[in-house]
Image: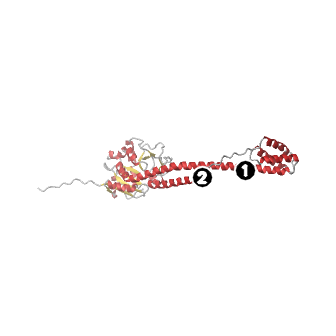
Amino acid sequence: MGWMTEAPVRALLDGVLPPAEGGYAALVFVVSREEGDGLLHRRHLSEWPSIHDLTGRHIAVITPDPERSVPISRGVAVRGVALFAGDHHTFVEPGERRRYAPGRFASTLPMTVDRHSRAVSSVATELQEYFGIAEDFLPCAVIVCTRERQAVAVRLDRQVTVYGLLKTVKSWLDPELARFAHASAQLEACADELGPAAAELAEANRRARSWFKATREHREWLEQREQVAGELETLATDVTAETAALCRQLAAALRLDQACDDHDIKIAETLFETLHGRTGQLSARNRRSLLRRLRRAVISEAPQVPAQPDDDLSSLTERASRTKSAYDDQLSRWTELRNLDVHDAMRSAVGKLGLEEAPTALLEWRRLRWPITAFAPRPQSGPSIRMGRG
């Protein structure tokens, strides 16, 4: 359940999220004043922990915060104009509309029941105007069903309480809640399979990419050495016999799939000195280019190529795809079951509690644009007295 700070009612309802989008199946507001039956007025606040345990993360009972501010907490937030409960309990601070303070999800009230009682009275008129509730219908509870976009107002008395009403609603929803709990367990099981399958595939792909990269780098290394070797053989046809022999010996060494040894390096150093001066028909520019690339080819080490991975990427991809498909199917079912039919449960609850429609409880004009229906306990008829004939 949660309390609001300075967020007006419209801020909680105009952009409220339905359960399928991470919100609540219903929001509950108590419209009441301290004057009159104080016990009845404070009862839902006194029973707050029990109601919280009853409603869980499906129904939010909203009450004002007498302190007008609360510490940031994980769970529920008013983001701009939307009250929501994140699946991962992520708290999001209000956006640009900073005048709407955050809400909080909690099993206990931040202040005393008496202080909250006065805070509830302070917003009674605003709630009345928003929902179009007549004064003589107070105290009442307004249940806003977010999926069906409808509201139900119920007159409260010593027998019909917020806890009793929600308990009856939960009893009606129990089969749906059981299916949802089962779907949640199955979704969690699918997630447990999806994570390792995706991780194993990702690691196998990483190994494959690493091997392909090393193979490509090794191939490029061989190609660069082959190009220099070819240029040395071409140069050998246009230089002295001694220089030509050095070119051919070094060209042969560069064509081997291994780094140059000390003997090859000594040959290269002799050839380096030769290339510093005029050599054959090479222009100065080409000679400097060949010298630079020859130095790099001689001193470079052969890139290490690891053993080719033996991962069966096809099977791993199929497994990851299969588990992802199963997860998506279960997520779809979980999302569908999360859409609790609170409005139908409310209609059943009011019937079970012996309530009847009370159209006179609703005013002709209200800010709420969703349909709203009011229910009240049946009037108690007084005892009848039969006069005997004497």
The amino acid pointed to by label 2 is: Leu
Residue 44 in view, yes or no? yes
Residue designated by label 2: 313
Could you give the CA–CA distance between mark 2 and mark 1, rounded to whole angstroms? 26 Å
Q: Quadrant of the C terminus?
A: bottom left
Image coordinates of residue 197 in percent, x first then y, are 55, 50
Q: Nearer the viewer, residue 38 or 61?
A: 61
- Residue 287 image label: none
Vertical position of residue 9 compared to residue 299: above or below: below
Of the two numbered discs 2 and 1 on the same chain, state the one appearing first in sequence. 1
Image coordinates of residue 385 in percent, x first then y, are 18, 54
Label 2 vs label 1, nearer the camera: 2
Q: Is residue 90 left or right of residue 225?
A: left
Residue 126 in view, yes or no? no
Instruction: Identify the residue shown where x is 78% and y is 46%.
Output: 253
Secondary structure under badge 1? Answer: helix
Residue designated by label 1: 220
Secondary structure under badge 2? Answer: helix
Q: Nearer the viewer, residue 201 or 344?
A: 201
